[in-house]
């Protein structure tokens, strides 16, 4: 067997390892372009320069070391760029046919980059069609606007919707590819994502779950996962705000059924101080609080205090039974869906017992009133 000096063997091993973690990006301009070209590493909301090269005889070349899937942009002096999704060990060739270059190039040696090209070029077509409608729309006279305005607006919406459907189809068909991240975050303009509807958040979650299995250490996947969490939290907040906006004038004023099924609202008690008390018969602490509430009710009901007690019991019959057994003299109501208690969420109730105080005008003036603090507040209000 032929023997090689140890130094050459070591060098060969190192060279082999490096080539496996490198990506080579070569470009050719058929129009014989000269000048500079830059390689940028891309993130969802920013990019950073990795390298630059001089275009010589219409050609350029980059070699970059990467440890996993990586998004790049090859950017020209005039600001034009093409996106790439590179994998370690790939030898990527770009062939630029004519201007505008992003719409007229081919890529080989990188399946992910070919997927990025498909996404980017479809978006270019959509933007061009939208720009055309904008120009027509802005040039209409008042008479023409009356005749064609609605038609053009519908055409604009249809184009945007077609792009959205394209991206959704792409995501479904490429769910295990990092290119699906590009499809998630594409924008029609600086302020409008292609996936703009609230329900599109499901696709962020689906892609995040899929890629987290395949690329658990990728920073792009980790960033996506964090974004999904923040967007889910934001959606929850928006949903709660939306529910609140649909309620009567005072959007955190409970309107709930009492033990006989009659709807009773705190707003119907205007002119009185109303202690809204959230409780559950399953909580011993809540049961222990009942004697103190009865004493307060006896002392101040005649002076203008009402108690509106909201049950979060899952067992409706148990709640009704306790109300009867304890002979509770105030208004007793219950959240119909204790697993998804609307008012306790709107009013930020995280535990029971929990009490809030409304003034006679229907404004919440105190929260977290209990024990000694509740007695002191009652004394301040009614024993002046």
Image (spheres, grey):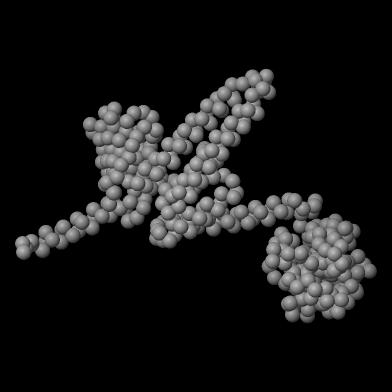
Q: How many marks?
A: 0
Name the residue rendered at 56%, 52% in the picture: 201
- Looking at this view, name the residue that lies furthest to the left: 2
Front residue of 89 and 67? 89
Q: Is residue 245 visible?
A: yes
- The spot of residue 375 in percent (x, y) is 82, 73
**Residue at x 40%, y 43% (from the top left corner):** 116
- Left or right, 245 with respect to 107, comes to right
Residue at horizontal 48%, vertical 54%? 207
Q: Position of residue 105 (x, y in %)?
A: 34, 34
Comparing 374 with 309, the one in front is 309
The part of the image, by quadrant, that contains residue 313 is bottom right
The quarter of the picture where the N terminus appears is bottom left
The extreme right residue here reads 302
Q: Position of residue 239 (x, y in %)?
A: 66, 54
159 above or below 212? above
Residue 43 in the image: x percent, y percent? 43, 48
């Amino acid at each position: 067997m032929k023997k090689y000096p140890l130094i050459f063997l070591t060098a060969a091993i190192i060279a082999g390892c490096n080539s496996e973690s490198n990506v080579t990006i070569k470009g050719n301009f058929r129009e014989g372009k000269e000048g500079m070209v830059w390689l940028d590493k891309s993130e969802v909301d920013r990019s950073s320069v990795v390298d630059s090269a001089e275009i010589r005889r219409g050609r350029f070349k980059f070699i970059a070391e990467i440890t996993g899937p990586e998004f790049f942009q090859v950017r020209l002096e005039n600001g034009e760029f093409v996106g790439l999704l590179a994998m370690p060990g790939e030898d990527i060739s770009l062939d630029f046919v004519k201007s505008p270059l992003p719409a007229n190039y081919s890529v080989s040696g990188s399946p992910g980059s070919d997927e990025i090209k498909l996404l980017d070029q479809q978006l270019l077509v959509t933007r061009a069609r939208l720009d055309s409608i904008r120009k027509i729309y802005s040039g209409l006279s008042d008479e023409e606007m009356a005749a064609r305005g609605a038609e053009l607006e519908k055409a604009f919406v249809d184009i945007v919707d077609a792009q959205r459907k394209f991206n959704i189809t792409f995501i479904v068909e490429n769910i295990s590819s990092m290119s699906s991240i590009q499809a998630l975050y594409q924008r029609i303009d600086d302020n409008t994502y292609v996936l703009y509807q609230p329900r599109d958040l499901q696709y962020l979650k689906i892609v995040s779950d899929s890629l987290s299995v395949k690329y658990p250490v990728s920073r792009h996947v980790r960033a996506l996962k964090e974004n999904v969490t923040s967007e889910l939290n934001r959606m929850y907040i928006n949903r709660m705000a939306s529910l609140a906006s649909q309620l009567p004038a005072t959007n955190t004023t409970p309107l709930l059924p009492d033990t006989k099924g009659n709807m009773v609202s705190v707003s119907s008690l205007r002119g009185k101080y109303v202690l809204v008390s959230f409780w559950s018969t399953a909580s011993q602490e809540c049961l222990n609080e009942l004697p103190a509430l009865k004493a307060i009710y006896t002392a101040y009901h005649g002076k203008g205090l009402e108690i509106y007690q909201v049950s979060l019991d899952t067992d409706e019959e148990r709640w009704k039974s306790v109300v009867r057994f304890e002979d509770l003299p105030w208004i007793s109501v219950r959240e119909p869906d204790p697993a998804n208690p609307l008012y306790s969420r709107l009013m930020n109730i995280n535990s029971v017992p929990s009490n809030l105080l409304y003034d006679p005008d229907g404004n919440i003036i105190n929260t977290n009133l209990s024990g000694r603090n509740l007695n002191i507040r009652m004394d301040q209000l009614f024993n002046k």
